[in-house]
Amino acid sequence: MFQEIDWSRAWYASVRDAASRIDLSQPSVVRPFCEQADALALVNHAGQPLRFVPQAALPEGTAYEEFIGATGQVPTRDNLHDFFNGLVWLTFPLIKRQLNALQAAQIALDGVGKSRGPARDAATIYDENSALLVVRDDAEGAALVDALRNHRWREAFVQCAPMFGRDAEVWLFGHALMEKLVAPYKAITAHTRVVRAGDDYWAQDDAGRRAWLDSAEAARLAGEGLAKGGFTPVPVLGIPGWWPQQDDAFYADDTVFRPKRKPA
């Protein structure tokens, strides 16, 4: 199962370091995830130590998010989906903790019904399928974001390609998104959150940037909450350097690189 993952792919850069510390020779990922969570002193939003437990530990009728918020225990199956979820917990623990706090608070308010409601829906989209686009907080960064939000794909990915790695970078967060990219296909699209960063971010190494992003985005979630409309769709394989055949024909495919819908 885990041998299917190509760790050389650019989209796994965000969790590659965490993955390198997991002993996949063990019969289950639960124990090595617990060991790493303990080493990092991770806690849930209530201050309880974060622990990974087998899926069977989740009581019947209890919502997954509610259980994590109440116990600090993360039900985990030995599959790719939950493997990537564990890696994201080890990589961006503050964001994951704040997302869980939002989800648990919403469940406490509304209960567990057939519909999640807009707040839980937005948190679930973030948790499962998001990417974080960090751009330098200047006019060029703002122009790149405007091009993406208005689906001017050639401007964003071809004309602005030199910005990626220098003034813009994408960190994958959603674990379902990472799972889909084990077998990549052109139409995979991330719900993308834009994070503007000053020179203090760009002066750091990868570990420093990851920690900065985790702290800054968690604080933003705590302060602003989360709206479903706060995402920008980005076809992941269109990101400059993330796929080998990024020629004119590639970006001309309007079934993937769709024009912006006009207001009704």
Image (cartoon, rainbow, N blue to C red):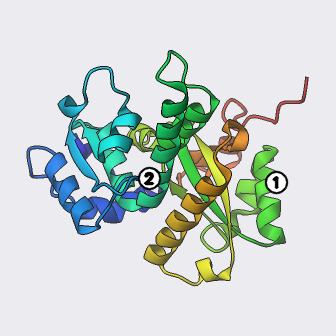
Judge by depth and name the residue closer to the eye, 182 or 77.
Answer: 77
Residue 263 position by quadrant: top right
The x, y position of residue 24, in whole percent, is 15, 52
Looking at the rendered image, the quarter that the N terminus falls into is top left
Q: Which residue is mark 1?
A: 146
Local secondary structure at mark 2 = helix
Position of 161 relative to 58 (above/below) = below
Position of 197 relative to 27 (above/below) = below
Crowd rating for badge 1 (residues with CA inside 10 Å; few <14, some 14–19, many 20+): some
Residue drawn at x 24%, y 50% as measured from the top left = 51
Q: Which residue is mark 2?
A: 97
Mark 2 and mark 1: Cα distance apart in space: 30 Å
The x, y position of residue 171, in whole percent, is 52, 58
Q: Which mark is residue 133?
A: none
Residue drawn at x 15%, y 57% as measured from the top left = 23
Q: Is residue 127 left or right of residue 78?
A: right
Mark nearest the camera among 2 and 1 is: 2
